[in-house]
Amino acid sequence: MEKSNLNKSARIISAIFNPFIVPFLAFGVLFFFSYLNMLPLTYRLVVLGVVYAFTILLPTIAIFFFRKINGWGMGVFKDRKKRFVPYILTIICYIACLIMMVRMNLPRYMTGIIIASLLAIILCVLINLKWKISEHMTAMGGVVGGLIAFSFMFNYNPTYWLCLFILIAGGLGSARILLRHHTLLEVLTGFSAGFLCAVFGILFL
């Protein structure tokens, strides 16, 4: 019974912190929990709508139809060899998002979030060719790396946010291991990859 409850909690944590939500979460934190909350509400909602459409809605729909066409169930992507096309579909959606944001003349620190996410996805694709990596932890590493990058960019202290997301990362990593979706090394590698991509993509590209 206890093990069943642990597995259920692990599945809930994995679902809540799905990799697809990370860019949207990043923009939400920026727009409502930083000085950017002074921007007009309509402007913030439009940007959030674009991010949601291209990083959550369209990739989810595309991958759903890809699964249905192939007659695959929900758990099929545990096999790293079957992740390639979903990765490519997601990359296409993120590139479209970046193009849309550039056409909207959004500032560099906003497009930097999408660039960092693209770097992380591409790195996951390359690693996935030979080895399995945790996309959940790559995304969470990106959140932590993004917080540090923005703290340098805007000169603020991110300690409280860092503590929160490091705790979440620990819980998420434990959940992925508990569900036997990943090993400890895959979890740590994913987090490190996301962290590095976020710092590099936001600060240097």
Image (tube, helix red, strand yellow):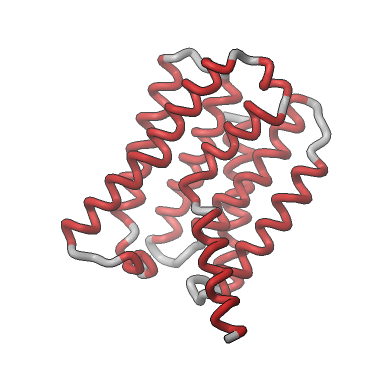
Considering the image in quadrants, where does the N terminus appear? bottom right
Q: Residue at x 63, y 44 (%)?
A: 143
User: In this view of the protein, which residue sits in the foreground, 144 or 125?
Assistant: 144
User: In this view of the protein, which residue sits in the foreground, 171 or 200?
Assistant: 171
Q: Residue furthest bottom?
A: 1
Instruction: Judge from the rendering whether residue 52 lies leftward or rightward of residue 22; answer left or right.
Output: left
Instruction: Judge from the rendering whether residue 19 lies leftward or rightward of residue 93; answer left or right.
Output: right
Location of residue 35 (image quadrant): top right
* Residue 81 in sight from this viewpoint: no
* Residue 29 in sight from this viewpoint: yes
Instruction: Judge from the rendering whether residue 52 lies leftward or rightward of residue 187; answer left or right.
Output: left
| Whole-percent x, y for residue 47 in the image | 49, 23
Q: Residue at x 59, y 61 (%)?
A: 189
Instruction: Judge from the rendering whether residue 87 lies leftward or rightward of residue 203; answer left or right.
Output: left
| Whole-percent x, y for residue 79 in the image | 35, 69
| Whole-percent x, y for residue 163 in the image | 78, 50
Up-down relation of residue 130 to residue 5 (above or below): above
User: In this view of the protein, which residue sits in the foreground, 110 or 45?
Assistant: 45
| Whole-percent x, y for residue 112 in the image | 56, 29
Q: Residue at x 60, y 24 (%)?
A: 109
Up-down relation of residue 106 to residue 72 (above or below): above
Up-down relation of residue 21 to residue 124 (above or below): above
Considering the image in quadrants, where does the C terminus appear? top right
Location of residue 69 (image quadrant): bottom left
Q: Residue at x 41, y 15 (%)?
A: 103
Q: Residue furthest front?
A: 1
